[in-house]
């Protein structure tokens, strides 16, 4: 178990033996949640650091039309909801639900503060996590400011292409998952992809996306 915990961002660079010593002297809980179990509700105070050791969880919100919107999936090993922990208003804004059977290490913030004082590496890791989350949220806000589905797809494809050596990228999500991610219907998304294909901007060989005209793709965002 300690080897899995050592792979999480908060314990990055700390050996399994050292983690064992840390947790043996720190009050903590390890809880297991079955698939679709509610881990925390929107509105709950966040007073704990959650470290996902096994499984996958998701954050989801309910809009004004009572539609459930998936915000993000988190896969082990990782942490979640850490940005709320030391906020003045530390109430969660989303429900946290287990996608699969999941095992979570839980450390109360008062115990975490003690760890920060005794272990500089854990403090550095936490600050790194918070900083990376801020960058992701900023990118997400920029993405959500794009008004059309085409612009959102173009932004998504360009972002994926940065991780590719050529203009062929793996379509990492199903159309249904991508529609949920964009907050649009699946038919609307499929229609937009077809339009981009017909306009010679992309090709769709199987589960891949090949960017044909990068300049046109960029203009969709502009």
Image: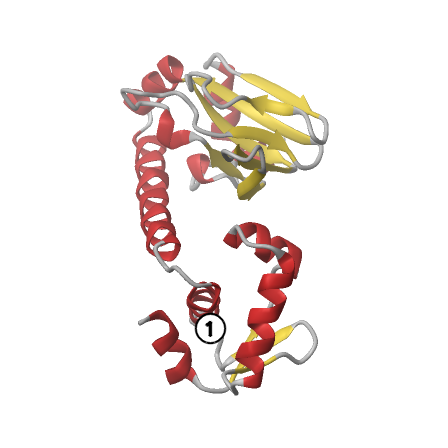
Q: Is residue 73 left or right of residue 222?
A: right
For residue 170, say whether it is visible: no
Residue 114, position as x, y percentages in the image = 33, 16
The quadrant holding residue 97 is top right
Please say if 185 is above or below 91.
below
**Residue 92 to residue 14: above or below:** above
Please tell me how many numbered marks the rendered image carries: 1
Left or right side of 22 for 29: right
Q: Nearer the viewer, residue 95 or 159?
A: 95
| Image vertical order of residue 155 relative to residue 53, above or below | below
Is residue 42 at all visible to an observer of this figure? yes
The residue sitting at 38% across, 57% down in the picture is 143
| Colour scheme of the picture | secondary structure
- Image coordinates for residue 60, horizontal then vertical, percent: 54, 35
Q: Which residue is mark 1?
A: 161
In the figure, residue 100 lies in which quadrant?
A: top right
Q: Secondary structure at mark 1?
A: helix
Image quarter where the C terminus lies is bottom left
Residue 81, position as x, y percentages in the image: 44, 30
At 56% from the left edge and 77% from the top edge, which residue is drawn?
Answer: 195
Quarter that holds the N terminus = top right
Residue 183, given in percent of the width and then of the height, sits at: 52, 50
Vertical placement of 131 versus 170: above or below?
above
Q: Toward the viewer: 30 or 97?
A: 97
Local crowd at mark 1 within 10 Å, few (<14), some, or many (≥20)?
A: some
Q: Is residue 4 left or right of residue 46?
A: right
What residue appears at the point 37 percent right and 60 percent down from the top-left corner? 146
């Amino acid at each position: 178990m300690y080897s899995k915990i050592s792979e999480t961002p908060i314990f990055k660079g700390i050996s399994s033996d050292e983690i064992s010593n840390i947790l043996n002297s720190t009050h903590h809980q390890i809880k297991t949640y079955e698939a679709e179990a509610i881990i925390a509700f929107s509105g709950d105070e966040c007073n704990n650091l959650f470290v996902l050791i096994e499984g996958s969880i998701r954050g989801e919100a309910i809009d004004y039309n009572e539609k459930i919107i998936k915000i993000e999936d988190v896969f082990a090993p990782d942490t979640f909801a850490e940005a709320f922990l030391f906020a003045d208003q530390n109430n969660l804004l989303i429900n946290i639900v287990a996608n699969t059977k999941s095992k979570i290490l839980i450390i109360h913030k008062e115990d975490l503060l003690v760890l920060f004082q005794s272990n500089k590496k854990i403090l550095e890791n936490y600050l790194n996590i918070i900083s990376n989350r801020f960058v992701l949220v900023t990118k997400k806000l920029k993405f959500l400011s794009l008004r059309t589905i085409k612009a959102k797809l173009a932004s998504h494809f360009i972002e994926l292409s940065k991780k590719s050596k050529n203009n062929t990228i793996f379509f990492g999500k199903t159309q249904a998952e991508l529609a949920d991610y964009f907050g649009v219907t699946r038919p609307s998304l499929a229609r937009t992809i077809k339009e981009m294909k017909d306009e010679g901007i992309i090709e769709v060989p199987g589960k891949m996306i090949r960017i044909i005209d990068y300049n046109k793709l960029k203009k969709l965002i502009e």
